[in-house]
Image (cartoon, rainbow, N blue to C red):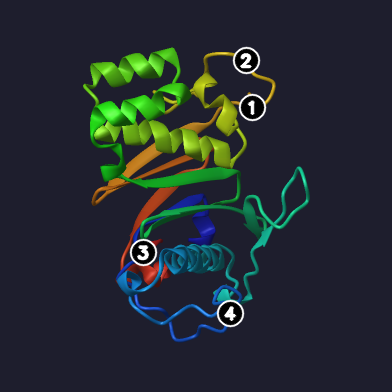
């Protein structure tokens, strides 16, 4: 993995994953050692965040040769300087997303954004189109109508836009000026001051068992997607 380090994306369901024994690291924070279904909604979000950070450290460790326990993730907002924003560690760019027990983590030497959503969120089609509409370009609206309200098409469109926000290609207020109908090149339908036009960027989308995951990244960085399960926690053996 270290010799061919590009972009790596891990996506899957963490609800049945047992918490590791070594819960004394920076991410633990008193996590309750109960099943995902037995804990509160707030604790579920904390559990998802824990796995995002844990997976990110493992991926960075595999890429750099540093033991994951020595990988420290830092977050600093470029605008306000606060302890949030896109994570980084050892020269690696990190992005993560989590929703209802599913997580996606992306690591790359170049900027990368990731988003994950349950496919069920985009059903029924009519209701989904209503809340998606303000975020769509005219071209995207026509595409979705031609697709007959396909949940997968809507999920791909939304997760790509959210991934673009993660690397500041646009903002939540300017989603309707970035067109994500094609994987590459990125299209801008209108000009907004807050939209960054550094090109090219590439979108990729995968579906894992009713979970949709999209990334946006440098097209020169090959992306490897890994489905998360009990066996892939030790990620090294999955990547040459």
Question: Which badge, 2 or 1, is on the more N-terminal residue?
Answer: 2
Q: CA distance from mark 4 to mark 3?
A: 25 Å
Residue at 67 percent across and 26 percent down: it is: 194
Residue marked by disc 2: 191
CA separation in Å, label 2 and label 3: 42 Å
Pick whichever, 16 or 106, lies toward us.
16
Q: Which badge, 4 or 1, is on the more N-terminal residue?
A: 4
Q: Which residue is mark 4?
A: 25
Marks 4/1: CA–CA distance: 38 Å
Q: Earlier in the sequence, mark 2 or mark 3?
A: 2
Mark 4 vs mark 3: in front? 4
Q: Are marks 3 and 1 in contact (CB under 8 Å)?
A: no
In the picture of the structure, the residue carrying the numbered disc 3 is 238
Marks 4 and 2: in contact by CB < 8 Å? no
Residue 92 sits in quarter: bottom right
Q: Could one spot residue 168 in this view of the protein?
A: yes
Q: Which element is circle 1 on?
A: loop
Q: Residues within 10 Å of mark 4 (few under 14, many from 20)?
A: few
Q: In this rendering, would 128 be left or right of 24?
A: left
Q: Which mark is residue 198?
A: 1
Residue at 40% from the left image edge and 47% from the top image edge: 116
Cβ–Cβ below 8 Å for labels 2 and 1? no
Residue at x 52%, y 27% (from the top left corner): 175
Look at the numbered disc 2 and give the secondary structure of its residue.
loop
Sequence order check: which comes first, mark 2 or mark 4?
A: 4
Q: Residue 215's spot in the image, x, y percent?
A: 46, 41
Q: Are dots 4 and 3 in contact, CB under 8 Å?
A: no
Instruction: Give the spatial CA distance, label 2 vs label 4.
Output: 45 Å
The x and y percentages for residue 199 are: 59, 26
Residue 32: image location, x then y, percent: 45, 80
Of residues 221 and 38, which is closer to you in this image?
38
């Amino acid at each position: 993995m270290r010799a061919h380090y590009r972009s790596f994306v891990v996506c899957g369901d963490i609800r049945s994953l047992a918490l590791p024994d070594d819960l004394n690291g920076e991410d633990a924070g008193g996590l309750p050692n109960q099943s995902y279904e037995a804990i509160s909604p707030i604790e579920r979000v904390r559990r998802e965040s824990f796995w995002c950070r844990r997976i990110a450290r493992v991926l960075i460790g595999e890429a750099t040769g540093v033991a994951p326990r020595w990988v420290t993730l830092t977050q600093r907002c470029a605008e306000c300087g606060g302890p949030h924003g896109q994570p980084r560690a050892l020269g690696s760019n990190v992005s993560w997303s989590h929703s209802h027990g599913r997580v996606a983590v992306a690591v790359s030497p170049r900027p990368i954004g990731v988003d994950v959503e349950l496919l069920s969120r985009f059903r029924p089609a009519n209701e989904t189109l209503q809340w998606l509409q303000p975020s769509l370009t005219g071209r995207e609206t026509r595409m979705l109508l031609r697709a007959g309200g396909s949940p997968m098409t809507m999920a791909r469109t939304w997760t790509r836009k959210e991934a673009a926000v993660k690397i500041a290609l646009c903002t939540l207020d300017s989603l309707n000026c970035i067109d994500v109908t094609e994987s590459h090149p990125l299209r801008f339908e209108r000009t907004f001051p807050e939209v960054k036009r550094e090109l090219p960027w590439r979108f990729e989308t995968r579906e894992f068992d009713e979970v949709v995951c999209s990334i946006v990244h440098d097209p020169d960085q090959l992306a490897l997607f890994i489905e998360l399960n009990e066996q892939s926690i030790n990620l090294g053996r999955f990547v040459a």
